[in-house]
Amino acid sequence: MEVGFLGLGIMGKAMSMNLLRHGFKVTVWNRTLSKCDELVEHGASIGETPAAVIKKCKYTIAMLSDPSAALSVVFDKDGVLEQIGNGKGYVDMSTVDADTSSKISEAIKSKGGSFLEAPVSGSKKPAEDGQLVILAAGDKALYDEVVPAFDVLGKKSFHLGEVGNGAKMKLVVNMIMGSMMNAFSEGLTLAGRSGLNPSTLLDVLDLGAIANPMFKMKGPSMLKNNYSPAFPLKHQQKDMRLALALGDENAVPMPIAAAANEAFKKARSMGLGDLDFSAVHETLKKPDHSS
């Protein structure tokens, strides 16, 4: 099966590498073309533009950073729309809002192509291990055709109905995750400041009803102030913002998510946007007046 892949950030690179490892032919494109080099060493081909990738491949997957990137790859010069047509499928796995997904879907379908949104739950390690959860919505026939690729990229994939539902589900999941990360950070800080050993708190949490993989995975590195990015904080804050907008549309009060969003914005203002989203922990540190 030949697949095109647009976008080789933390997630896209890991996902396209997985497809190559499992015998897929992959043609890759990235805005910074040098990012393609490592994949070429593992057997990938390079497409000079998104349009060139679409022309060559029956199915193309995109994994881009935000709504503006997702739109520009489709609508700009040498973009997806220049070559998409009958018999070609476009799968956008970026995390965007439902409106962005709908715009892309309508444009692809107007050219005769088929469209699936398929954002994922999971960050760098699940992407590397093929353990993502894929939240697809849109053209069911295309979904059925690309399931072999989804089976390599994820541990489970869902078809959630019409375009927009995948985007909404992803935003709800990431809103909960961002809110949890803030509560977790406050707990670690409170334990330390009140004379407890935060490492013991991690052990206690892991044995109780709120044990979860995120606390287990992120806690030890947070205690070492290690925030190498699996999921960059600036993207987490973007997802909080989009989730809050979804709350506005549906008149859902979201005071906890709103407070979490403010904490992520504070972290961005401190220059932590490119670090892992767990770096929101740094917003709770006492200011150092020793200098």
Image: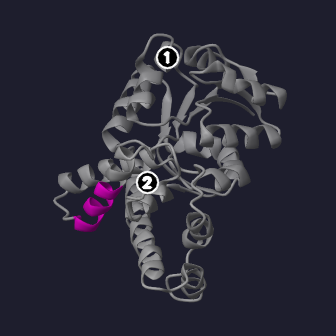
Instruction: Tell me the kind of residue under disc 2.
Output: Lys
- x 71%, y 19%: residue: 46
- SS for dot 2: helix
- Tell me the quarter of the picture where residue 122 sits: bottom right
In the image, residue 10 lies in the stretch drawn in magenta:
no
Between residue 286 and residue 87, name the one nearer to us. 286
- SS for dot 1: loop
Q: Position of residue 86 (x, y in %)?
A: 53, 21
Is residue 6 shown above or below 267?
above
Numbered label attached to residue 103:
none
Q: Position of residue 53 (x, y in %)?
A: 63, 19
Task: Tell me which numbered mark, 2 or 1, is placed earlier along the sequence.
Answer: 1
In the image, residue 260 lies in the stretch drawn in magenta:
yes
**Magenta residues, as a range?**
254-263
Is residue 179 shown above or below 233?
below
| Residue at which label 1 appears | 79
| Residue at which label 2 appears | 170
Is residue 233 shown above or below 94?
below
How crowded is the residue under tag 1: few (<14 C-alpha within 10 Å), some, or many (20+)?
A: some
- x 52%, y 19%: residue: 84
Name the colouring of the figure: one colour
- Tell me the quarter of the picture where residue 103 sits: top left
Between residue 174 and residue 202, name the one nearer to us. 202
Instruction: Tell me the kind of residue under disc 1.
Output: Gly
